[in-house]
Amino acid sequence: MKYDITFHPKWWYKNAGIHFTEEFFCEPEYRMDCDVKMRKELYEHFGEFGIGEKNPARRPLIGSDLLACGYLYSQIMGCDIIFEEDNSPQVVCMELDEDTVEELEYPNLETNETWLGVKKQMEYLKDTYGHVETHINLMGIQNIALDLMGQELMVAYYTNPEAVEALLEEITNLSITIGKTFQSYSKQLSGGVTAITKQTVPECYLTSNCSVEMISNELYEEFLLKHDQRLADEFGNFGVHHCGQTMEHVVEGYKKIKGLVFAEVGAGSDLAFVRENLPDVFLNARFSPARLLEASEEQIREEVQKLWKAGGADSSRLSVSCVGIDQNVPDEKICAFLKACREVEES
């Protein structure tokens, strides 16, 4: 069975001295230097499990597949971003309400400074190294809308659905245009959402539906399903990242997406129920980093085995990953998780 781990910036800051200031995201050569250090650090800690590289070569990457953070689309839409040394970029919500969102000026990508900066990086990498690895977090339609409206979005679903529909339509248009641009540079698009896609469904377009956990299946189907379907139609191989604890509550909506090939199932979700409803979709089961900290090594092993069985016990349709591991989780716990994943098919 394929498996993966992804660390919180605080882990990288403590163990490899990586600073996640704006320079990391905007200066390609600096990011490439950091990327080499990061992959070597992974090897020194977890190389016996095939994690990291002993002598990593430089990679011409935009974004990073060693983090899980989404901010770029919201920045392009006008949100301010706070960069910190030991944290992911933090989006400052614009706090638009149902009236002011109707006055929002949507970005012109031909003149938007943030997007032009990204394109400049990609052109530099392509001209200098011959290719680009695209690992930008693709975010998701409602995630971006929440960065613009905050909790007012939840109210506007009921009080001004027309304004919400218009907003979601524009966000989807933007996402398709940006995604198509990334696709013109690299076939692998989704490593910045979850790195496991590189091992499992490398050409999948994976949308980040983190915030879908907050709404009912009825709201998902009424407002968001059509936009996920547009993404699926545009990009062909399509996946949903649902890191919430109850993916089963919206699986009825997800199963209606034509072209769905991958789903990331949040820790705590009823994986067996999701598998029953998505029998032919590749599932990546998330293991909670908080649980990794508190569980014993034996409990970790038992819980990985439960995920394996609940997901169908089929390595051609199931993987497991733990994402967001911070500096408080000792290596012994992480190794116990990796060992359990490696050996699960033998149990």
Image (cartoon, helix red, strand yellow):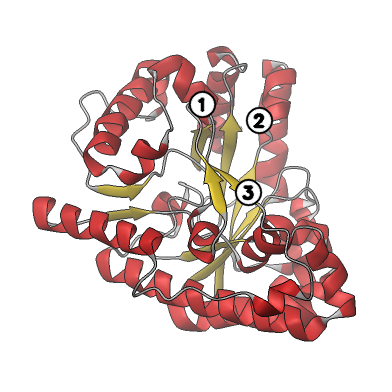
Is 49 displayed left or right of 140 in the figure?
Answer: left
In the image, which is nearer the foreground, mark 3 or mark 2?
3
Given the image, on which type of amino acid does mark 3 rest?
Val
Which of the marked residues, 3 or 1, is nearer the chain's N terminus? 1
Q: Work out which quarter of the rendered image holds the C terminus and state it.
A: top right
Residue marked by disc 3: 92
Please name the residue shown 31% across and 33% down the image. 35
Tell me if residue 170 comes above or below residue 282 in the rendering: below
Residue 108 appears in which quarter of the rendering? Answer: bottom left
Tell me the quarter of the picture where residue 112 sits.
bottom left
Q: Residues within 10 Å of mark 3 (few under 14, many from 20)?
A: some
Badge 2 crowding class, 10 Å Cα cut-off, few under 14, some 14 to 19, many 20 or more, is many
Camera-near label (3 vs 1) is: 3
According to the picture, the residue beneath numbered tag 2 turns out to be 289
Give x and y (percent) for residue 188: 35, 60
SS of the residue at dot 3? Answer: strand
Write down the residue under mark 1.
86
User: Residue 133, can we see it?
Assistant: yes
Relative image position of residue 302 (x, y in whole percent)? 72, 28
From mark 1 to mark 2, how far is it between C-alphas? 18 Å
Residue at disc 1, secondary structure: loop
| Mark number, residue 218 | none
* Separation of marks 3 and 2 at Cα, in angstroms: 25 Å
Within-10-Å neighbours for mark 1: few <14, some 14–19, many 20+ = some
In 3D space, how far apart are the residues under numbered discs 3 and 1 (Cα atoms)? 17 Å
The disc, 1 or 2, on the residue closer to the chain's N-terminal end is 1
Q: Nearer the viewer, residue 217 or 35?
A: 35
Residue found farthest to the bottom: 162
Q: From the viewer's perspective, is the residue at label 1 or at label 2 nearer?
A: 1
Q: Residue at x 41, y 70 (%)?
A: 178
